[in-house]
Amino acid sequence: MIDSDSLILALNVGACLLLATLAAWAVLDERIHEGCIVRAGLILVSLGFAGIAVALLHGDGLLTLQRAMGLLHAGIIVVLLGREWRAHRRHKPM
């Protein structure tokens, strides 16, 4: 019988790995044209989710988890700034 803590840990690790894979897919897919800033942010997001999964799986401690979450948050900020920059450039008259 699996206890609830192990089940929650397994679900969290699985979700993080799935999100890391989806972010990496968005970077590598040729049909998605978002520019290099957004792609750099998605790379950080993918690495952040992968780092969270590894930190949770290995139980490396709070510092490793915080660093992975910092990587994830930095990636989200870069993606949002890249999208805003792209939208600003699109509406600017030349």
Image (tube, helix red, strand yellow):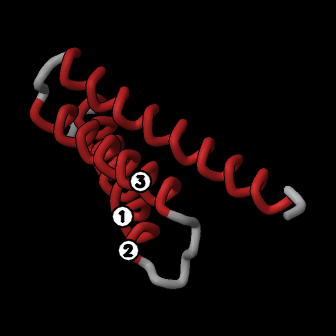
Q: CA distance from mark 1 to mark 2?
A: 6 Å
Vertical position of residue 84 compared to residue 65: above or below = below
**Residue 72 location (% of width, % of height):** 40, 37
Q: CA distance from mark 1 to mark 3?
A: 11 Å
Viewer-side label of 1, 3: 3
- Give the residue type at disc 1: Ala
Vertical position of residue 60 compared to residue 19: above or below = above
Are the two marked residues, 1 and 2, in contact with CB atoms closer than 8 angstroms?
Answer: yes
Any mark on residue 24, and which? 1
- Give the residue type at disc 3: Ala
Task: Determine which residue is flagged by label 2.
Answer: 28
Residue at the far front in the pictured view: 94
Task: Determine which residue is flagged by label 3.
Answer: 40
| Front position in the image: 31 or 49 | 31
**Residue 63 location (% of width, % of height):** 20, 16
- Give the residue type at disc 2: Leu
**Residue 52 location (% of width, % of height):** 28, 37
Q: CA distance from mark 3 to mark 2?
A: 11 Å
Viewer-side label of 3, 2: 3
